[in-house]
Image (cartoon, coloured by chain):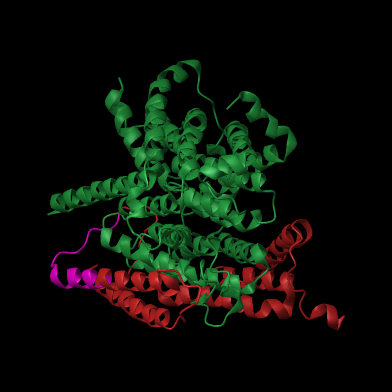
Amino acid sequence: MAVGDLIQPLFSTAIVPAAFGGVAWGILGGALPGISPSITMALLLPFTYGMDSTVAVVLLASTYVGAEYGGSIPAILIGTPGTNAAAATVIDGYEMKRQGKAGEALGISLYSGFVGGLFGFLVLVLLTERLSSVALAFTPSSYFSLGMLGLSVIASLAGDSLLKGLIAGVLGLMVATVGTDPVTGLNRFTFGSPELLSGIPPILVMVGLFAVSEMLVQTTAPDWEKATRESARIRFPTPAMWRRIAKPQAIGSLIGAFEGMMPGAGGSISSFLAYNEARRWSRHGEEFGHGSPEGIAAPEAANNTVACTALVPMLSLGIPSSNSAAVLLGGFLMHELVPGPMLFVQHGEVVRGLYAGLLVANIAMLIIGYLIMSPCIWLVSRPKPYLMAFIYALVVSGVYAYQGSLFNVGVALAFGVVGYALRYFAVPFLPMVLGVVLGFMIESNYRRALVLSNGDLSTFVRNPISAALLATALVVLAGSLMRHSKTRAAAR
Amino acid sequence: MKARDLIFGIATLVVAILYYGVAATIPPSELADPVGPQGLPKTYAVLLAALSLLLIARSVRRPVSNPEPSSPESRIPSPASPLPRVTGMLLIGIAYILVLPWLGYFLSIAALITVTIYFQGGSINVRSILVALSGAALFWLLFIWLLRIQYPAGIWPSVI
């Protein structure tokens, strides 16, 4: 992709304001303990419905970028990570704050996030289109196998209980069957309700599972510590500090690039891996845990790299490797953009716009990250009842805005209950989201492939692409099963 | 955890049976392909039932408790979570759905904010009411004025 292709979209649409707005929203959301990047994105999702599709996806992706940095703000200032990925930042970030170096810690976090984000952006631009070009030769059987590969990710996302992850995945597939049958046009599981004829939109499932269920959990959670305004003046690293943190940033960026593309890894795992590796390779290893700048640089570079590289499998193959990528996929589907090979052919301008938006978002993070500190401190310090009330108002208003339907608000609340129940029973709910998102693709292509082959099941292994995808799915599944059995054996 | 797995397994088994029952009532179509509209739903139901039975068997047989999931999104609400608080939050949402067509957007959202603040432990005073009204105005500006979303106007325009 030429540099001109990246710059041109910046002049034609509202990409720049969307990138800045998304980053600002992401930082604010990420700074609120308990509100993960995926929840911040899910809250925004209904608003993007009426927008230009390029602007909408840029807004969502920029929110992801901003939220990954935002999570480090409470991690450093109050010792509570705003996001899961910022948990590693607490170790040295909060220690630096206790030593009176909060501004320096925030500066290192912001600058390292910027470096990691740019590296992730380069990986995204260089890899995504090449990977997707393979899929131009896809047939219905290949698409079915791609869906199965996507579902095999459940094994990695299932946490410590594969069985419960699989159950959640099947529940998601069941939700995807609600509505009009993709081949015969018959109504299924609609119970006479006209609102269900077009199925249950994935966006409602996501808002319910992520945002509403988190709100229900927060209802009974204790309040978090408040930050003070004077503790939060950002100080950017000195040249000597730049040199010191360059190596941990490189380690974090490389780990983030690799882990971001791996199903189920996500920001939290890469942050801790980066922290650990940075300590191992550091000349000041003894400082880790006692306020080491390198202990902030490595995880922050890693989780911001992930914010870009997690989009590689999502854009090229339509497989979300993390919660946030799944919500972004929901945004694409809402605008009838199907990630995968045809996206680059049919909607190349959207992809180019997204790349340009992500580049702007990473630069915007430096500027807004500096300017937004005071509003962040103000927001984190609001009384919890007021924050909860406004989040609730935002959820119900946003869901209604999606299709102008009160029925949808009820559906989102119902999935909030499902999400709460899944949390209570310790069932990971990302497999359910995957089932909902991939269910239609799997069923429609499975049946179309069988119609084309006169019911011959061998079509799925005779087509080389389909066979390769199924084999990859088996390898992913086998690898996850081996990991699970090793973990269980170690636990015994 | 073992008891929770057992309850979850039984619940999903019930879902599988009910789902299969409804899937079996889907009428056959003349346009039907080899799989048909019932095919995959029935398969999903059987799969869910099998997985549920496995979970039930595992939770009955295994004496040790399961390790908690490492998945970051699966934070488990405390067992002591008072269910009334969660139910109350849901009832506020349901009440909002019911009153919105009557009260219109501005008053409904102001009421939702006020009641949620009170329910979450805040007090009803001039400050909280002012915050709720300001919040409602902000949301009104965002959704109705800026995004042009058609919310129910309520009974007020006809009364006036």
Question: Which chain is drawn using red?
Answer: B
Residue B71 located left or right of residue A375:
left
Residue B81 located left or right of residue A315:
left
Q: Quadrant of residue A367?
A: top right
Q: Residue furthest front?
A: A454
Is residue A428 rendered magenta in the image? no
Residue A398 located left or right of residue B62:
right
Q: Tally the numbered discs.
A: 0
Q: Is residue B121 visible?
A: no
Is residue B55 rendered magenta in the image? yes
Image location (x, y in percent) of residue A160:
26, 55
Residue A342 to residue A235: above or below: below
Image location (x, y in percent) of residue A99:
41, 32
Identify the residue shown where x is 47% and y is 42%: A137
**Image colour assigned to chain A:** green
Q: Quick one: quadrant of the C terminus of chain A?
A: bottom left
Q: Quick one: quadrant of the N terminus of chain A?
A: top right
Bounds of the magenta segment: B52-69
Residue A313 located left or right of residue B15:
right
Identify the residue shown where x is 47% and y is 19%: A242
Image location (x, y in percent) of residue B36:
43, 72
Q: Quadrant of residue A342?
A: top right
> Viewer-proximal residue, B87 or A438?
A438
Residue A437 to residue A102: above or below: below
Q: Is residue A480 visible?
A: yes
Image location (x, y in percent) of residue B30:
50, 77
